[in-house]
Amino acid sequence: MFDNLSERLERSFKILKGEGKITEINVAETLKDVRKALLDADVNYKTAKTFTDTVKTKALGQNVLTAVKPSQLMVKIVHDELAELMGGETAEVNLDGKPAVILMSGLQGSGKTTFSGKLAKMLKEKNRKHPLLVACDVYRPAAIEQLRILAEQIGVPMYSEPESKDPVNIAQNAIKEARMRGYDIVIVDTAGRLAVDEQMMNEIAAIKEAIHPQEILFVVDAMTGQDAVNTAKEFNDRLNFDGVVLTKLDGDTRGGAALSIRSVVNKPIKFVGTGEKLDAIDPFHPARMADRILGMGDIVSLVERAQEQYSEEEAKRLQRKIAKNQFDFNDFLSQIGQIKKMGNLKDLASMLPGVGKQLKNVDIDDDAFKSIEAIIYSMTPAERSNPELLNGSRRARIAKGSGTNIQEVNRLLKQFDQTRKMMKTVTSSPMGKMMMKKSR
């Protein structure tokens, strides 16, 4: 999302020359270029100007340490201000209440319904909650059905009254249902329009007044740029919402909404949607996003995603198998499955420092593992457990069964063998042995 902005900022920092101190003379051109980069990224003009003025004030007169270049010091200052611009601290969602009621708001097409499903799934799996999804969009014909399908996919109950056209009454009845059945979270999906209108605003304001939600989230499509900021302001003036959800953050957008919205409405971004899958939802961390914008990656988020997919017991089991050189194709297949659950591959790779820029024009197919999986699935159970059995005739049969060729099968077996040797070497090292002792 921020590829162009990242490139522009990197070029801006290279302009900065001089040693000893950052002065008005040697910082002027850099900040001019930073401001232009922000404006080109569709950041609100007032926000961009305030941002560069603040950076200038903090940078002027700063002593540059011998081991640090002026450009490196400026990167640090810009990083801290970018994080502050986007909210500074990570904002939590308010789950107090019996049940806690979360009201979703936003325009039609912003992704409210899909995000409602994602949020319910996250709260169920990570927070051990028991959410109830509520269909209060009584105008869009497919809205109730869409929410019902999402609810089934994530194993969460859904409340609707298909014959009713009164969203206020539906929301009130849903909360009564939640109390009666012991659901501790109620997520109310409301109607949107193609543009802000008085009828929609009056309706959602009436729902708010009737159910007194603990949390009101405004869902906005990051692809809409400055229109997202303007719409957020209109909704906030009427609803005084608690936080913003930016969807489609994985799309081809300039990123101005993410950088502007906090300063314009003075409400935190709480969640971001990073894909179409129901687990493509992340809490918004301003400092981590600043890292990614400046090409520093986001290792913390990458590790957190990995931890969500790998249990400690599974990790210990694998360590023991690797130490005994027993890592097989069943384990390999399991690892591929865990990686795929972590999110789309390009997004994962962009979290590695310096990698995002390299991948700007590279299309990483989420089906990249498909041929590997086809080859492994074409093996017999005995072959998966004992790769040493794979002689020439078996390889030819596997190639035919997987729709690949013998060269691809041989290449996979060679890569697998190299991986297994590397794993064995690592676990045999002093550090590896120490880790094995801790895992026992």
Image: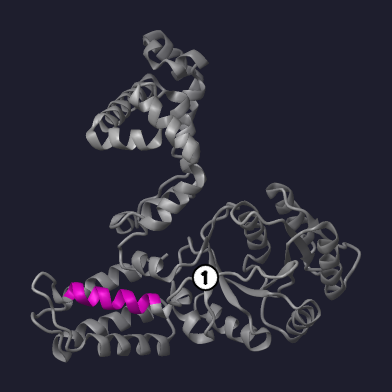
- The residue at 49%/67% (across/down) is 284
Q: Is residue 360 visible?
A: yes
Q: Locate residue 193, reporting x and y percent.
A: 71, 75
Q: Locate residue 365, reporting x and y percent.
A: 44, 45
Question: Please, which colouring scheme is shown?
Answer: one colour
Nearest the eye: 390 or 60:
60
Residue 424 found in image quarter: top left
Residue extending furthest right? 163
Q: Quadrant of the C terminus?
A: top left
> Magenta segment, which residues?
71-83
Q: Is residue 106 visible?
A: no
Residue 34 found in image quarter: bottom left
Secondary structure under the numbered disc 1 in the rendered image: helix
Q: Return the residue at label 1.
A: 222
Name the magenta segment's main secondary structure: helix
Disc 1 marks which amino acid?
Answer: Ala
Q: Locate residue 256, reporting x and y percent.
A: 44, 76
Q: Is residue 275 magenta?
A: no
For this view, does 91 lie left or right of residue 297?
Answer: right
Nearest the eye: 167 or 41:
167
> Dot 1, how many residues are within 10 Å of its Cα: few (below 14), some (14-19), or many (20+)?
many
Asked if residue 191 is positioned above or below residue 329 in the image, the reply reads: below
- The residue at 36%/38% (across/down) is 438
Q: Quadrant of the N terminus?
A: bottom left
Q: Is residue 80 magenta?
A: yes
Asked if residue 144 is positioned above or below residue 383 in the image, the reply reads: below
Q: Locate residue 109, reporting x and y percent.
A: 64, 67
Asked if residue 103 is positioned above or below residue 147 in the image, the reply reads: below
**Tally of marks:** 1
- The residue at 59%/82% (across/down) is 231
Nearest the eye: 178 or 237:
178
